[in-house]
Image (spheres, rainbow, N blue to C red):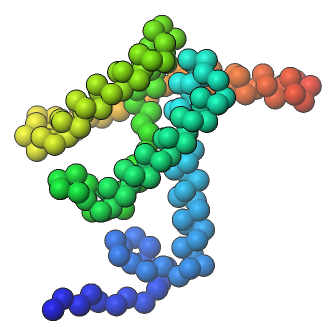
Amino acid sequence: MNKEKKTKASIDNIYTLNGKVPLGHAVPFGLQHILAMFVANIAPIIIVANACKLSNGQIAMLIQSAMLIAGIGTLIQLFPIWRVGSGLPIVMGISFTFVSILCFIGTTYGYETIVGAVLVGGILEGTLGLFAKYWLKWISPIVAASVVTAIGFSLLSVGLAAEVEVRTLVRCRTGLSEP
């Protein structure tokens, strides 16, 4: 018989997989995690939806759908099904990886084309993920780092444009000028 070792709730257990943390510490940490996840999940949607000039109702529907799918994906990661899922508390969500190209596709060809591209890309990426053990050895850490850096640089213009919009909105609403 396997009996799990009972652990006492302690703040030292915060970084262990099955550690128990006192409720007074667990609630604030959990809220912080949820808020960080929520912002990271809705920001790409808002950026792409505004580029495509979608209505507020469409944006709300996209955000609700994304949060539902992120929750389902998180549960699959936590409780694996077949070979899908890690068994670890990994929070799934939306990636910023494709924001710049989706903004281009959306403004040029429309939102419907984005939906088709995401469906095809998702099927391809899921298939590649199932066979990762065969091709992962060919991707060196320098290649992975270069891809992440390129993604960051491609999003730089989006961040700068958003900052200008926020500053303009603040000036219009408050009547204040910048120092």
Q: Image quarter for residue 28?
A: bottom right
Tell which of 179 and 136 is nearer to you: 136
Image quarter of the C terminus: top right
Seen in the picture, residue 103 relative to 121 is either above or below; the reply is above
Q: Is residue 145 left or right of residue 48?
A: left
Q: Residue at x 57, y 75 (%)?
A: 25
Question: For this rendering, which residue is in front, 175 or 92?
Answer: 92
Whether residue 160 is visible here, answered yes or no, is no
Nearest the viewer among 149 and 68 is 68
Q: Is residue 144 left or right of residue 172?
A: left
Q: Position of residue 7 (x, y in %)?
A: 37, 88
In the image, 170: left or right of 6? right
For the N terminus, which image quadrant?
bottom left
Residue at screen point 50% across, 40% down: 65
Front residue (pair 139, 44):
44
**Res. 102 in view:** yes
Q: Give the x, y percent position of residue 82.
A: 17, 56
Quarter-of-image position of residue 18: bottom left
Q: Which residue, as the protein is rendered here, is positioned at the far right?
A: 175
What residue is at 11 percent from the left and 44 percent from the top?
133
At x 12%, y 40%, the residue is: 131
123 sits to left or right of 137: right
Name of the residue lying farthest toward the left: 134
Quarter residue 61 falls in: top right
Expressed as whole percent of the image width and height from the top left, the position of residue 20 reads 43, 80
Q: How many marks?
A: 0
